[in-house]
Amino acid sequence: MPLNLKRRLGREEGWTFIEATLSVVLISIMILGLTIVLLAFREHLDRSWGLRVMDQYGNDVVERLTHELRNATDVTVRHQINNPSRKIDRIDVKFLDPYVHNLYHTNYWRADLRNARILVNNNNEIDPTFPPRQPGRGEYYVIQNFSLTPFGGETPNRPNELEREESFRRKPEFVESTYDITFTIRYNRSALRAGEHNWFVEREYRNKVYLRNKNLIVKKGITD
């Protein structure tokens, strides 16, 4: 083999220090990029799960309160907090015992603001799994509104001019027995590392309900 060819092949064997350094740098960049993608995907999953839990709870509260009000004979609304940015009510739902003549019961609905949950009769939870007992880092929920507004009244965060005008054309029996339920929850994720930002989503769950027993004979008790 010619001497020049041996020298050229000798120079091509193995990696030089520069080539090894470049390879390490490229591999590090790839690992860092993959880590960032995985962390972003994990954050997306955590946020999606937090919102799904909030949606489930918000809909459950509104549906259960709607069911009770439909069968109620009367309701009393007492303000816990009532200001331009936040409205929290205590809702007393009165209903007739289905088996005993002229016997009434009352369920007391209120917002436990410290623990971000709705309680019935002070200790009965709508869903014991909400809020999650082991939330993620920086994750928490806040009840912004929990209110029951008479038909045509001012509902939180939403103008009600059309309904107010309609209330003057409706019969008093309908107006006095129709209410708007508003339940607003905010899902928060606080920044945990430098360069991150606080993130939140606020959603409102609503329904309109008619107290069908308020103006019926059933209010007077079970008759023969």
Image (cartoon, helix red, strand yellow):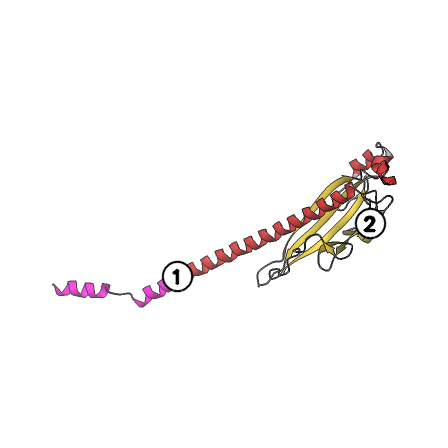
Taking the magenta stretch, the answer to whether it contains residue 23 is: yes
Percent from the top left, x then y, of residue 155? 78, 44
* Residue identified by numbered label 1: 27
Q: Amino acid at mark 2?
A: Thr
Q: For the residue labelled by badge 1, is the local secondary structure a helix, a strand or a loop?
A: helix
Q: Quadrant of residue 149?
A: top right
Residue placed farthest to the left in the image?
A: 1
In the depicted structure, whether residue 192 falls above or below residue 106: below
Q: Is residue 5 visible?
A: yes
Q: Amino acid at mark 1?
A: Ile
Query: With 191 as the anchor, is 172 left or right in this view?
Result: right
Marks 2 and 1 sit apart, C-alpha to C-alpha, by 67 Å
Q: Quadrant of residue 114?
A: bottom right
Query: Which quadrant, please, contains the N terminus?
Result: bottom left
Query: With 9 as the anchor, is 71 left or right in this view?
Result: right
Percent from the top left, x then y, of residue 94? 83, 46
User: Is the residue marked by circle 1 packed among few (<14), some (14-19), or many (20+) residues within 10 Å?
Assistant: few
The secondary structure that dominates the magenta segment is helix
Front position in the image: 52 or 94:
94
Residue placed farthest to the top in the image?
A: 169
Front position in the image: 143 or 18:
143
Percent from the top left, x then y, of residue 131? 66, 56
Front position in the image: 52 or 13:
52
Number of the front mark, 2 or 1:
2
Q: Which residue range is magenta in the image?
A: 1-25
Query: With 33 as the anchor, is 131 left or right in this view?
Result: right
* Residue identified by numbered label 2: 106
Q: Is residue 215 visible?
A: no
Query: Which quadrant, please, contains the C terminus?
Result: top right
Percent from the top left, x then y, of residue 130? 66, 55
